[in-house]
Amino acid sequence: MIDLITAETQRLVSRRMTRYFPLGLAALMGVGVVLAILLSDGRGPDFVTDIASGYYNGSDFGDDSTLVLGPMGFLVPIMAFVIGASYFGADQKAGMIEQLLTWEPRRSRLLLGRLAGGTAMMFVITALLSAFLVIMLYLMCAIDGTTDGAFDIWPKVLGAIVRSGLTGAIFFALGMAVTVITNNSIASIVGFLIYVFVIETALLSPLLPKVSRWLPMENADAFVSRNGVGGGGLFGGQSFNGLLPDFHHGWIAAGLLLAVWAGTAFAAALVLFNRRDID
């Protein structure tokens, strides 16, 4: 099993999608920070209060929140899902899946090996990408603002990097599982993008918040930033300084919900893959 995981991890790393997607995001981050410095009006940001900590109408959003990786709560799920879907889809396009389906007794072993190697590698890639963003933001503040007190919050920032990596691993598993279920990587990727930008973001979040608080993208953002998901206070919700409505659930519950989404999808993928016939 270890040899299988090692081989599948090497295959994942060798794919252009796995290398170029994170590198492209890193390049955009670098360009964005450079532009922010060049276009600054001389009043640069404070790394602690303006970037790393959460504020709401000028008041503290909560001591536990870490918003330095806020954008990653949206970008990481998309990147990881696409890489996970294309990883399995590439074998479908090459005809390898048809050959693997003849390997009847070990289909689950194959998928589990890919899951183990893929999620571990995606955790590393996402964590490194998140660390790069933190470094770039820190340099921006050091050049054009202030970093006073930054070292006092490094444990919180490191926690955000780890949570970002876990989010990447979860959405990699989700992307791979959806592709196995649909048996079409293009359909799963396009469907996921439509879901993210249209269904959850544009429709469910503003119109049906009681539904959206259970959905992957909203919980991914809450988990990475260590904030709660708003909407009622069912699981011991709390408000900060009386400024915000009670939370429906916190960041730990958000992470567990993400794991449930991925675990349920992958369990269904295992069942369908074991029952799939050769075309």
Image (cartoon, rainbow, N blue to C red):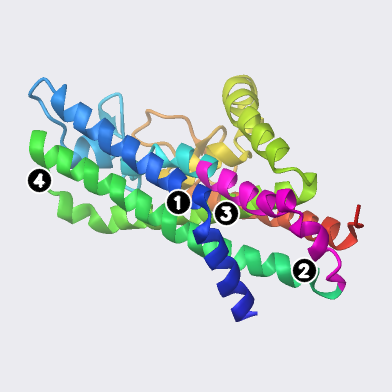
In this view of the protein, which residue sits in the foreground, 56 or 75?
Answer: 75
Quick one: label 4, few (<14), some, or many (20+) residues within 10 Å? few
Residue beneath disc 4 = 148
Q: Quadrant of residue 34?
A: top left
Label placed on residue 170: 3
Q: Disc 1 on helix, strand or loop?
A: helix
**Viewer-nearest residue: 69 or 240:** 69
> Does residue 226 show up?
no
Mark with earlier residue (4, 3): 4
- Residue 241: quarter of image: top left
Q: Position of residue 38 (x, y in %)?
A: 14, 25
| Image vertical order of residue 72 relative to residue 197, above or below | below
Q: Viewer-nearest of labels 2 and 4?
A: 2
The amino acid type, in three-letter code, at marker 1 is Arg
Mark pair 2, 3: CA separation: 18 Å
Q: Earlier in the sequence, mark 1 or mark 4?
A: 1
Circles 2 and 3: CB atoms closer than 8 Å? no
Q: Nearer the viewer, residue 120 or 254?
A: 120
Residue at the image point whose x is 42% and y is 46% from the top: 22
Q: Mark 2 vs mark 3: which is more N-terminal?
A: 2
In depth, the one of 231 and 109 nearer the eye is 109
Q: CA distance from mark 2 to mark 4?
A: 52 Å
Magenta stretch contains residue 71: no
As measured in the structure, the alpha-carbon distance from the residue carrying label 3 to the one carrying label 1 is: 19 Å
Of labels 2 and 3, the one closer to you: 2
Question: Which range is magenta?
Answer: 79-104
Q: Residue furthest bottom?
A: 2
Q: Quadrant of residue 173?
A: bottom right
- Per the image, the residue denoted by label 2 is 108
Q: Which residue is mark 1?
A: 19
